[in-house]
Amino acid sequence: EWKFPASIIRSIQYQYEPNQAQNPLEPAIIHMANILSHAVRLGCCGTFCVPPLNNAAWEVLETSPSVLPTTISQAERLAGDIFQTFLE
């Protein structure tokens, strides 16, 4: 059994509906990270499509879809750097 702190468990539980959480910021971050990892094919959880984005996450994170191209580009570059570090 994993013994994560309650705050992490709650953040994971509410990641698909962050606005339902008492503190929605952390679930919204996890929600966005999950979507980005699928978009750049770093994670799939048994599915090969990008999960739908909860619109409330944009509001909680105070951002908009216009940040996605830059964010995805940065995520791909950083993931490449991390993989290269471990493979050296």
Image (cartoon, rainbow, N blue to C red):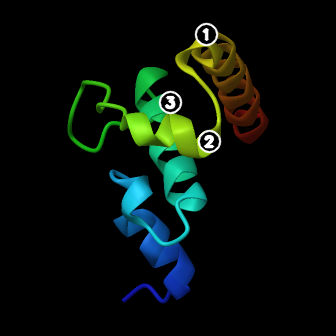
Residue 16 drawn at (x, y percent): 33, 51
Identify which amino acid the numbered label 1 is placed on. Pro
Q: Looking at the image, how many numbered discs can be counted on the residues?
A: 3
Q: Position of residue 17 (x, y in %)?
A: 34, 53
54 vs 40: above or below: below
Residue at the disc numbered 1 = 69
Q: Quadrant of residue 56?
A: top left
The residue tagged 3 is 36
Q: Quadrant of the N terminus?
A: bottom left
Q: Secondary structure at mark 3?
A: helix
Q: Amino acid at mark 2?
A: Leu
Residue toward you, 21 or 78: 21
In whole angstroms, how far apart are the C-alphas of marks 2 and 1? 16 Å
Q: Which residue corresponds to the image point at 43% horizontal and 55% vertical from the top-left?
A: 18
Q: Secondary structure beneath disc 2?
A: helix
Foreground tag (3 vs 2): 2
